[in-house]
Image (cartoon, grey):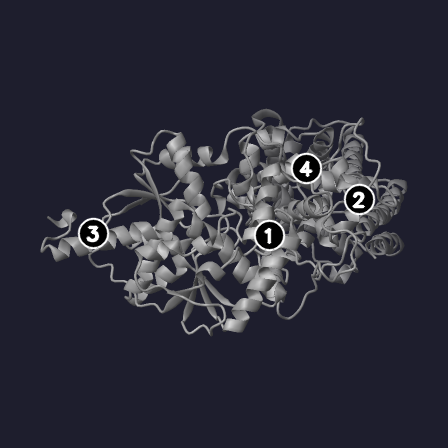
Amino acid sequence: MLAVVTALSGVTATVFQWHDDSEVQREVFENIPSPWKLVFYTAIPVMFICGAVLFSQRVRNWERGAPDDRRTTRKNIGRRMKDFRAGVYMKTLLRDPAAGIMHSLIYFSFLILLAVTTVLEINHQMPEAAKFLHGGVYRAYAAIGDFAGLTFLIGVTWAIIRRYIQRPYRIRIKTKPEHAVVLGTLLAIAVTGFGAEAWRIALMGRPSFETASFIGYPLSGLIADGNNLAGAHQIWWVAHIVSFFLFLAILPITMLRHIFTSPLNMYLRDRERPKGAMRPMPNLMETELESFGAVTIEDFTWKQLLDTDACTMCGRCTAVCPAHATGKSLDPREIVLKTGEVMARTGTPVVSPPLGVDAEITVSSSSMFERITPEEVWACTSCKACDEICPVNIEILDKILDMRRYLSLMESNFPTQLGSAYRAMENSGNPWGLSQSDRATWTSKVDGVDIVDPGDPFAHEYLYWVGCAGSFDDKNQKVTIAMAKLLQRAAVDFGILGPSETCTGDPARRSGNEYIFQMLATATIEQLNTMGVKKIITQCPHCFNTLLNEYPQLGGHFEVIHHSQLLEQLIDTGQLDMTNARLEERVVYHDSCYLGRHNDVYLSPRKVIGSLGGIEIVEAGRNGTTGMCCGAGGARMWMEESVGKKINDERAEELIATGATKVATACPFCYIMLDDGVKGAGAENTVQVADISMHLLAALEAADEHLGSGRLPASAD
């Protein structure tokens, strides 16, 4: 359609030759011979058609993927448009101000320049009486065009300096020759545009109304009068048109395609499953599928394949990946690019890869593991930092987890230590492999905790889901005890399952073993539904995420609340009286990935710890959505970390550097990993790691002790 409209506009202008007699206006194709106009109006439609054909070939590659329901409905249209606006307004890019402003200068300026050209062509087609681009309108038009051209030139120059002079690591390691072609083309468009304008104004005799072109007019004054003005103008015009033709030629075959694919990907971000849930699989006991997980391009969904063409290769995902930062082989950007490469090279027809690759690298089949190693896949902590930082909403983690499913279920290709955890979950109901009868031993230190028999109806308001770490790990038993005492203090009606509680299956699912996950989850769901459980409290973000977001896939619908959220509510309602509770310490809170990025719970833990008087709260350099992982997610808790620096050591050093005397956590894995990291740094005598519930209870009990002795808290003495 665009090609037809362009061709017809050329025919219309040639046949009718409508002219604007206003003194203040711009003559289109001034000094351009008719044969050149014919070439222009012929070549542009051809370029549009060729580009459309090349884009359609990429779409055919996406269609190789499995179904994924991303339909627009009345329910999701609002969220879709919000995601789209966030992308096209550069909100996600502006989280990195320098890169965001640079891209904004290029992107918005290009759109304005495109609009300026379109307006000129529309005016060109109008009859004399309908023409509008004259007088004051033309002056404003000329000023806007020059302003957009200037900001475009600044943005492109900035991009060149950033890539080839400043050379940040994430950009430097993936700079290819095509980047020079793209940036060179954009630079040529900007420079030749101003050159053609300057020589056109000089050729016209520099009329005063052209002063509105505040870049072109001064430049025209630098051009010496002579007989070659017409020829020089034609050369600049041709150079400008050729640079635009080159832009259209490389648009569908280079990273420039993200101009179209990235907004589309952002629009399609919204999906039916919750943010923290993995893609559901059919019942493995009943399905007729012969292969599980992703090993070939066809195993991914069409949306996952679109992701690869939406990638801008910016490397933000690489920059925030904790595995990559500590010397592991995983590079999230490479996962996307290699997936796109395999898709492109095995398609019908074969299309260009997302980014140029070395000639000696070959792809003989659609198997992902020709280009991606199992070591890359297993290095992931599933922290979701890559997904969260991506400015175009690429779902990187899903691809990794789907490949883990194949490695685990189809090839049994997983780390040895993970095999022990699998056997323990199957045989003992927990990855530690400890006896289920020991799950409730912690209750000996807390009076009045009701252990509910699974055969009895559940008569309490809340089921306190202690979790495997809270039941078996010595450190986290202290968290469980603290939380139970806080619940009793607030008169919350709760009970526990004790020996009847099993692992939710999160470690199995995040490491790809869907079979064990479904075995554990279906048994737990049946048990809880039979008992009539409605509300669940959990102190483990991994249990929280699984119970809340993934059990509904198997028929388990419960009201699940994390202990940080419940404690916040109890404090707000006065059920926990914090009047005299004080903590005269400098405290830094460490964000749990599964509480934060997977479920967007950032403020509740901070409000809980901030409810204590006398406290000084500081933030680590990486916090909130950009928080650094502890290294235990994605079942990494049960795998050895033998390559590079340990992630928990890296994070512990960052937290210690804040000068905090206490580290507050809200996840049992984070507690274990950071406590080990602090000890590894030799700071255990100066920095204490503990769950928010432990800090809270210690402050409350200290206040009780002071009041009971008739003394005020120490800070008020």
Name the residue type under label 1.
Answer: Glu
Q: Distance between the residues labelled 1 and 4?
A: 24 Å
- Local secondary structure at mark 1: helix
On screen, residue 597 above or below 489: above
Report the amino acid beneath label 3. Answer: Ala
* First in sequence: mark 1 vs mark 4: 4
Q: Residue at 66% across / 54% down in the picture?
A: 515
4 and 2 marks in contact (CB < 8 Å): no
The CA span between labels 3 and 1 is: 43 Å
Give the residue type that dot 2 points to: Phe
| The image quarter in which residue 358 lies | top right
Picture coordinates of residue 182, whole percent (x, y) = 72, 35
Q: Mark 3 points at which residue?
A: 702
Residue 204 position within the rendered picture, expressed as x and y whole percent measured from the top left: 72, 39
Q: How far apart are marks 4 and 3 (CA)?
A: 51 Å
Marks 2/3: CA–CA distance = 84 Å
Residue denoted by label 2:
29
Element under disc 4:
helix
- Single out the mark in the foreground, 1 or 2: 1
Q: Mark 4 points at which residue?
A: 374
175 up-or-down from 258: above or below: above
Instruction: Give the residue at mark 1.
Output: 426
User: On the rendered structure, is 682 left or right of 711?
Assistant: right
Residue at the (67%, 68%) spot, across then down: 73
Say few, some or many: other residues with alpha carbon within 10 Å of mark 2 (under 14 / 14 to 19 / 20 or more). some
For numbered disc 2, what is the local secondary structure? loop
In this view, the residue in front, 3 or 365, is 365
- Work out whether mark 2 precedes mark 3 in sequence or the reverse, and give the earlier one: 2
Q: Nearer the viewer, residue 459 or 577?
A: 459
* C-alpha distance separating marks 1 and 2: 77 Å
